[in-house]
Image (cartoon, rainbow, N blue to C red):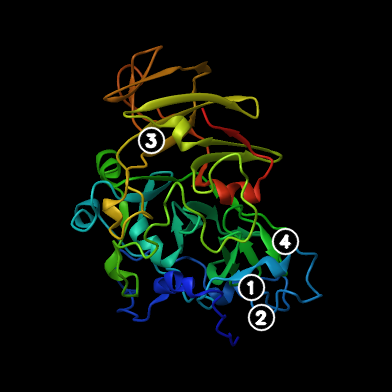
């Protein structure tokens, strides 16, 4: 299906266009035993009878034959690149931790996804330039996504109406957030909330899976057997390890390519930790849950208790041109504190986190590393780390906790 290059909105979109710089590298070898190519071919997906066929929302998002859109199509803005101009990784290749340690620095942020015993680490230095990885983890078809303008790293199960699909980058933004498209119907999807908002699949919702952005040092310490996305076999040549959005993460700055109104309860670029479920949403300002050393924050959501662990040691990917040199924004984990029917309470010290009931020590992944509960894992709570302007634009009803 032919595509037309989208027009840049301002001279500033050169910042984004840098992420789709030309130069394809050697394509991954499909005979390589480390290959993890998705199990469903694109042709098979597109022929699935329970997915609709018709006009592509990439070609015409105003087509009157579509179901009623969930957002105003005129508010979807060009980000500069054409569809897949920022190319997703469709054939992800992986290396072991020791190999990746040669090019990853300890403070760098890495998105960790675990399904069963399959633990995979997706360095933000790679996601920065690709935004979507279509992968299969522990037998689950997943879309691992990252929107640099919102700093939102979210993992979805890429199954729609029982059909495995893959996702691409549309080249457009909504509330400065990545607009994805599924390649089966070319409907448009918000990355931040996983909804199909324009096109044949309007109203469909992707299932979000727990994933956590964590420092490389913590990945090495806690998951030495993890598979790490290989930057040498993405199929493209990019300046991995550098940040093309230098200065974006300025707590006193303004969002880029955002045309909405900023919720004045907090600064636009305040980092938050947000949780939602149906009609309920709550966000904690990073300033409220962080400190000079590890911290523990308790709360409730939707009637259930939760605990938030924070520790220093993760660099901002969006601060300086060198990702590893960004300011320290710390690591976050959110969990249910219930273990075998008992609610645990926690304290933080220089070594991490300790529960009051048994004296067991816990890490940022919510696993007890020593003490009577060693090997026990707290149930993770799905959350999103992002900027306040973006989250509030999607969920203006959010309760904000600042202290």
Q: Nearer the viewer, mark 4 or mark 3?
A: 4
Q: Which residue is mark 1?
A: 186
Q: Would you call the spot at circle 2 few (<14 residues within 10 Å), some (14-19), or many (20 or more)?
A: few
CA gap, disc 1 and disc 2: 9 Å
Quadrant in which the N terminus is drawn:
bottom right
Of the numbered discs 4 and 3, the one sitting upstream in the chain is: 4
What residue is at 53 percent from the left and 70 percent from the top?
A: 168
Q: Residue 213: x percent and y percent?
A: 40, 46
Residue situated furthest bottom in the rendering: 2
Give SS at disc 3. Answer: loop
Q: Would you call the spot at circle 1 few (<14 residues within 10 Å), some (14-19), or many (20 or more)?
A: many
Label 1 close to label 4 by CB (< 8 Å)? no
Q: Nearer the viewer, mark 1 or mark 4?
A: 4
Label 1 close to label 2 by CB (< 8 Å)? yes
Relative to 69, is 391 on the left or the right? left
Of the numbered discs 4 and 2, the one sitting upstream in the chain is: 2
CA gap, disc 4 and disc 2: 17 Å
Q: Which residue is mark 3?
A: 365
CA gap, disc 4 and disc 3: 36 Å
Of the numbered discs 1 and 2, the one sitting upstream in the chain is: 2
Q: Which residue is mark 4?
A: 71
Residue situated furthest front in the rendering: 252
CA gap, disc 2 and disc 3: 43 Å
What residue is at 34 percent from the left and 74 percent from the top?
A: 235
Can residue 161 be spotted in the picture? no
Give SS at disc 1. Answer: loop
Classify residue 371 by image quadrant. Answer: top left
Residue 59, numbered label: 2
What residue is at 57 percent from the left and 39 percent from the top?
A: 275
Label 2 close to label 3 by CB (< 8 Å)? no
Relative to 382, is 26 on the left or the right? left
């Amino acid at each position: 299906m032919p595509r037309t290059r989208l027009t840049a909105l301002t001279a500033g979109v050169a910042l984004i266009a840098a992420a789709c710089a030309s130069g394809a590298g050697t394509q991954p070898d499909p005979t390589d035993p480390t290959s993890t190519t998705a199990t469903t071919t694109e042709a098979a997906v597109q022929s699935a009878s329970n997915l609709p066929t018709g006009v592509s929302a990439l070609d015409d998002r105003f087509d009157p034959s579509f179901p009623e859109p969930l957002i105003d199509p005129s508010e979807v803005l060009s980000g500069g690149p054409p569809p897949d101009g920022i190319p997703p990784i469709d054939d992800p290749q992986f290396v072991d931790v020791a190999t990746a340690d040669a090019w990853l620095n300890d403070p760098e942020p890495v998105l960790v996804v675990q399904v069963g015993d399959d633990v995979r680490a997706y360095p933000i230095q790679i996601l920065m330039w690709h935004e979507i990885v279509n992968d299969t983890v522990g037998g689950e078809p997943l879309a691992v996504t990252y929107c640099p303008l919102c700093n939102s790293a979210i993992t979805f199960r890429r199954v729609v109406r029982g059909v495995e699909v893959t996702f691409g980058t549309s080249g457009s933004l909504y509330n400065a957030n990545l607009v994805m498209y599924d390649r089966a119907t070319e409907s448009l999807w918000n990355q931040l909330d996983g909804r199909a908002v324009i096109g044949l699949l309007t109203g469909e919702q992707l299932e979000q899976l727990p994933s956590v952005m964590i420092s490389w040092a913590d990945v090495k310490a806690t998951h030495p057997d993890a598979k790490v996305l290989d930057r040498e076999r993405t199929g493209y040549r990019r300046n991995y390890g550098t940040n093309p959005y230098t200065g974006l993460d300025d707590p006193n700055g303004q969002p880029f390519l955002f045309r909405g109104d900023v919720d004045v309860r907090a600064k636009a670029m305040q980092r938050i930790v947000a949780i939602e479920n149906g009609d309920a949403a709550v966000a904690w300002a990073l300033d409220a849950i962080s400190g000079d050393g590890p911290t523990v924050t308790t709360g409730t959501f939707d009637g259930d208790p939760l605990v938030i662990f924070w520790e220093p040691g993760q660099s901002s990917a969006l601060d300086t041109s060198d990702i590893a040199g960004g300011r320290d924004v710390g690591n976050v984990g959110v969990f249910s504190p219930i273990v075998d029917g008992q609610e645990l309470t926690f304290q933080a010290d220089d070594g991490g986190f300790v529960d009051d009931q048994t004296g067991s020590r816990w890490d940022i992944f919510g696993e007890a590393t020593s003490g009577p509960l060693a090997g026990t894992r707290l149930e993770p709570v799905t959350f999103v780390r992002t900027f306040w302007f973006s989250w509030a634009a999607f969920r203006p009803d959010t309760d904000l906790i600042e202290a």
